Image (cartoon, rainbow, N blue to C red):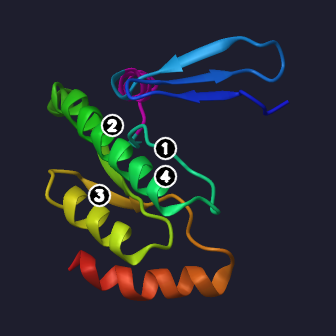
Amino acid sequence: TGENAVTVTEDHVIFKSYRDGAKVTLTPESSIQAQKDIGADIIIPLDELPPHHIDRDSLAASVERSHRWEARSLMEHLKDSRERKQAIFSVIHGGTDVELRTKSLEYLTSLPWDGYAIGGSLGNGRDELKQLLGWMMPLFN
């Protein structure tokens, strides 16, 4: 079952296979190296994807953790980014919370990413997604 399939700590994530119980541990750094090793053209840092219905304090903690992981991922990527010519995109988080999304966007756009992805919960349906993108996209300029 999916119960206890994922364990999140400050340092890493442990995924447990629903098939055989095998565990895979990913850190921000090992995630970047795995993507570099397979020759990914665009690398996405390790981040946390909380559920849509989460309380604000938990969402804020998740955004902050993702920011720390993304910074660690970027530092790992920059160690040899010129050699491999691979891009790295950050992932903007914050659910549908305007303040948290704005904070995420402002923090991540202050770092030297090659591009940006909009991640996390994007709302509950097409209307919420359109509303989210409507106010957020102009902030990228």
**Image quadrant containing the N terminus:** top right
Mark 3 nearby-residue class (10 Å; few <14, some 14–19, many ≥20) = some
Question: For the residues carrying marks 3 and 2, which lies nearer the camera in this image?
Answer: 2
Q: Earlier in the sequence, mark 1 or mark 2?
A: 1
Tell me if 112 is positioned left or right of 88 in this view.
Answer: left
Q: Position of residue 93 (x, y in %)?
A: 41, 59
> How far separated are the C-alphas under marks 2 and 4?
16 Å
Look at the numbered discs 1 and 2 and tell me whether their residues touch, using CB distance below 8 Å.
yes
Question: For the residues carrying marks 2 and 4, which lies nearer the camera in this image?
Answer: 4
Q: Which corner quadrant of the image does residue 76 belong to?
A: top left
> Residue at (74%, 21%) from the top-left corner?
17
- Magenta span: helix, strand or loop, mainly? helix
- The residue wearing badge 1 is 48
Q: Is residue 56 above or below residue 96?
A: above
Q: Secondary structure at mark 1?
A: loop
> How far separated are the C-alphas under marks 4 and 1?
11 Å
Q: Secondary structure at mark 4?
A: helix
- The amino acid sitting under disc 3 is Gly
User: What stretch of residues is rendered in magenta?
Assistant: 30-40
Q: Which corner quadrant of the image does residue 51 belong to?
A: bottom right
Q: Is residue 34 above or below residue 101?
A: above
> Residue at (69%, 78%) from the top-left corner?
125
Q: Earlier in the sequence, mark 3 or mark 4?
A: 4
Q: Position of residue 15 (x, y in %)?
A: 63, 24
- The residue wearing badge 2 is 69
Mark 1 nearby-residue class (10 Å; few <14, some 14–19, many ≥20) = many
- The residue wearing badge 4 is 58
- The amino acid sitting under disc 4 is Ser
Tell me if 52 is positioned left or right of 119 in this view.
Answer: right
